[in-house]
Amino acid sequence: MARKVGRAIHLVCSTTVALALLLLLGAGYGPVPALGTALVPGGGVWASSSGRTTVRTETLTLPELEEPVRVSFTAEGYASIEARTDHDLFLAQGYVTARLRLTQLDLQRRMGQGRLSELVGAAGLESDRFELSLGLARTARARWAAIPENSDSAKALTAYSEGVNSWMSSLRKTGEWPTIYGLTGVRPRPWTPTDTLVVQGVLTQQMNFNTIPLDYELLNRSLGPELTRTWFPVQAPTAQRPYDPGPYRNLPPTPLTVRNTNAADPDAAPTTPARPTPRPASAHKDVALPDSVRQLDFNSNAWAANGPKAAGGGAILAGDPHLQTTLPSYWFQVSLRSPGYQVTGGSLPGVPGVLVGHNKHISWSLTNAQTVGTLYYREKLSPDRPDSYYWRGAWRPMEKAHYTIPVRGGSTEDLTVDLTVHGPMMTVLDQKVSVNWMGNYAHNDLNALLAANRASDWTSFRTALRGWKAPALNFVYADDRGHIGTLLAGDVPQTPKGSRPWLPLPGTGTADVVGTIPQEALPEAYDPPGHLVASTNQRPTGPDYPYFLGTTMNFDPGYRQAVIERFHSERRGLRTEDYTALQNDVSDDLAVRLLPALLTALDGSGLTARQRAARDLLTTWDHTMGADSAAASVWWTFLDSYVHEVFQPWWDRKKVPADKDRWILDLDRSPIPLREALEHWTLDDPDNAAFTPPDGARRNAPQAMRTAFRTAVAELTDELGDRPAAWTWGKLHTREIPSITGAPGLGYEPYADGGNPWTVDAAGGELNSSFGPSFRLVVRWTGPGSAAAAAIYPGGQNETPGSAWYDNLVALWRKDEYLPLRPPNDAADTAATWSLRAGD
């Protein structure tokens, strides 16, 4: 246990990573002054920032408006926007979001554009180099150029940008910029449609960019191919619970119709330079992968039930995307009403529309599909041709992308990125590869999202999502006619038969992407006979699915799924309160499966008095990871010890380089495939050779379990004292909601809490967790056009710490309380109103 307690909290992922770099402002860096106590909420510089601490009723003039717009706020800060045109709706959404979240908007786009260093100095360079190399900004520009001018997405992007810029125009006149800009003298640039597409790309990266093939390569080199295949198999050894049981269609891959915008042109004629031209030594740098820019945890639960399982025979849906929990949050709750839209739910700051929620007829939530989205290629290079690579029988010149990185308080840095037909060349986990990532293709995903916002039934919803490409997501659906469904939407790349996309692929052309899984063959379910659909990041199909989706490293093992299915098997007539209770459930299904074997192994094994007391806690335990449960601490510490007892000798002997990727290869993280393997061997193969250490005396699962249990009791004694009854889980396990600045006093400090990474109420990352349910939603359909919806998220609508809406929702979230998710025409509980009008 001591191994984990000392670990740092989970690095802030993706969008919030960029914001976390602002912790420098708390200590000072170069020309950036230390803020110290000035960051304390309600005082210091915050009191003079532009984000006023109280939203009040007022009339405002926005020159770009076509008609008057009404914006109303509940007492908790939820915003409703009513507009007479769709243009004005999205303009107002941009304005309202910017007024309450401008710093967050700017920092998200700075991360994706590789311009953090301009604000925070040299500390931002690692992130900037990576993001410029990956190419989010290039992709955003290409996407915007490809979007038809009269499309819904182009109009929404333009109007949203006008709204953000309207607020920034006001700030330029008053000079009341948010604190960070006042202190540094840096000002945010005007917002553009490409900025929204960059922000969208950042979230795609956080959910879909991973290093799994490179981790497999490191395991192959150390453990060897045989052990790697056995311990980290492509197909899990235990049965998964797919939502699409088949039979499956086996169709040819669908060719990609758009280009990888951050790759060399594959149609360019090959050339062989007579004499290589050396690049300037100062211009090119190896680009490493920061831990903070990739997917590290599993994301989300979503389920829906109908028929006899739902009260009144209608349909009921629940969703809770699992992301980093921070102040401010990933989410901005909003209701939107115009001639074309009537939708309510969670929006992403910087992006028009609603990502999860409901409209007049349908509701939906989502989970990460976890499918393969990042492929790596080992290019054939030659020291005689330093700027060329070998592809399809010829040497070809690498294309060059040149960037200039402004660094606050330092010298401007030049960066040159080499591009092959597969993507940018990078050094990732000490491996020099080119990166082919599905987020770099010039699709128009926003058009699909807006169409889904307007959909009225399963057919129109499914049709809308045919245009959704990245990240690949599972959408769960319920409507006012009592129908439910789930489907996987997005591009899942396919390589030629016989290739191994779970490893770095040869770059010579023999293993290039041949297309994606056809839409008609993607997993889905609609009104199944069991009256339940559920998605918890598990593999969505059985082992005979004819396409490559990913490996056991990709998918959740299904413990949350089992809890959700068991809950529904025992109940009928479910209501909103049943689903809120399930969203907050902390039952550990792995304990349900393995605990009997552990107790059997401990029978008659000569335990000490303290060990017997710890064992006795488990004999009456209900398998829940409650903060007050001492048995939960015993179970968790035992499982951690069991993983190390079995695998650490192999890791040491084989020299597995866990330090190169501690998030995937370090045993302290209990890699998912190893947990599944232990479950399988313990129950079905207790004499498996893995239980015997290299060159050690032969042993079996019960013997390894007994040793691991004794080690766990010793660790808990050292950590929490000699009374097992006092070893409550909350003494080991905490949650926190850190400030995006990292400054002390601005976050919601750690508190004792329940859950673990594979409970429905998930707590991912470390023992001090800041990853979990970031937005909880329940929608119960009570008739045609009639929804009773509730939602909560751990944060607040306003990013200004002195505001009453900064963290006001956290206490409700902690107490498992929800607030009504009202439609945009509900005037109840209006605390303030903005009347927006056109004019100069």
Image: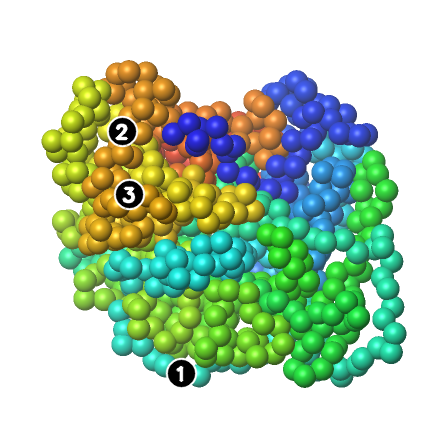
Callout 1 amino acid: Leu
Residue sitting at x 18%, y 66% = 529
Q: Is residue 198 visible?
A: no
Secondary structure of residue under mark 2: helix
Residue sitting at x 41%, y 58% = 228
Q: Residue 363 appears at what percent x and percent y?
A: 37, 57
**Residue annotated with mark 2:** 710
Q: Mark 3 to mark 1: distance in Å? A: 51 Å
Q: Mark 3 Cα within 10 Å, few/some/many (few <14, many 20+)?
A: few
Who comes first in sequence, dot 2 or dot 3? 3
Q: Is residue 536 above or below residue 670?
A: below
Q: Mark 2 to mark 1: distance in Å? A: 54 Å
| CB under 8 Å between discs 2 and 3 | no
**Residue annotated with mark 1:** 251
Who comes first in sequence, dot 3 or dot 1? 1
Q: Is residue 125 above or below residue 546?
A: above
Callout 2 amino acid: Arg
How many marks are shown on the rendered structure?
3
Secondary structure of residue under mark 3: loop
Q: Residue 301 appears at what percent x and percent y?
A: 35, 50
Where residue 697 is drawn, which disc sits there? 3
Given residues 359 and 180, the one toward you in this image is: 180
- Is residue 720 rendered to the left or right of residue 309? right
